[in-house]
Amino acid sequence: MTRRGKLRTRLERSKGVCRRRDVVGYYTVHGFESREGGKHTVFHHPRHPDIMGIVARHRMLDVAYAKAALRAVDRLLERQPGGGAGR
């Protein structure tokens, strides 16, 4: 299984809390770039700037951050040729 697949599985299985490094890693392996905001890290995709995500700076995050990352990457994959192939 690829790193993308492992991270996706971890995020999908998260119940209640998840690790920040898993969420950040999932955005990163899909080509998102980051910038540091006040209390959060903001991720955006260079080819699709309207697809973005926000991640708090805590080791453990609420599962909502994982679900938001999964939705953002799903939207990205739908826009790529092949309509989401490679998940």
Image (spheres, helix red, strand yellow):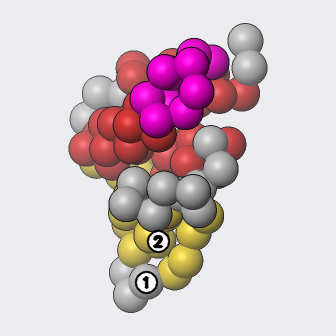
Span highlighted in magenta in the image: 77-87
Q: Quadrant of the C terminus?
A: top right
Q: Is residue 25 visible?
A: no
Name the residue rendered at 26%, 35% in the picture: 16
Q: Quadrant of the N terminus?
A: top right
Name the residue rendered at 50%, 21% in the picture: 84
Tell me which amino acid carries mark 2: Thr
Mark 1 and mark 2 residues within 8 Å of each other at the beta carbon? yes
Name the residue rendered at 43%, 83% in the picture: 37
Q: In the displayed structure, does residue 69 sit left or right of residue 83?
A: left
Residue 56 against residue 70 in the figure, above or below: below
Mark 1 is surrounded, within 10 Å at the Cα level, by few (under 14), some (14 to 19) or many (20 or more) other residues, namely few
Tell me which amino acid carries mark 1: Gly
Residue 86 is inside the magenta segment: yes
Residue 6 is inside the magenta segment: no
Q: Residue furthest front?
A: 81
Q: Return the residue at label 1.
A: 37
Residue in the foreground of this view, choosing between 78 and 33: 78
- Number of marks in the image? 2
Residue in the foreground of this view, choosing between 38 and 18: 38
Label 1: element kind:
loop
Q: Is residue 71 visible?
A: yes
Residue in the foreground of this view, choosing between 74 and 39: 74
Q: Return the residue at label 2.
A: 41
Mark 2 is surrounded, within 10 Å at the Cα level, by few (under 14), some (14 to 19) or many (20 or more) other residues, namely some
Residue 61 against residue 43 in the figure, above or below: above
Q: Residue furthest right?
A: 2
Helix, strand or loop: magenta stretch = loop
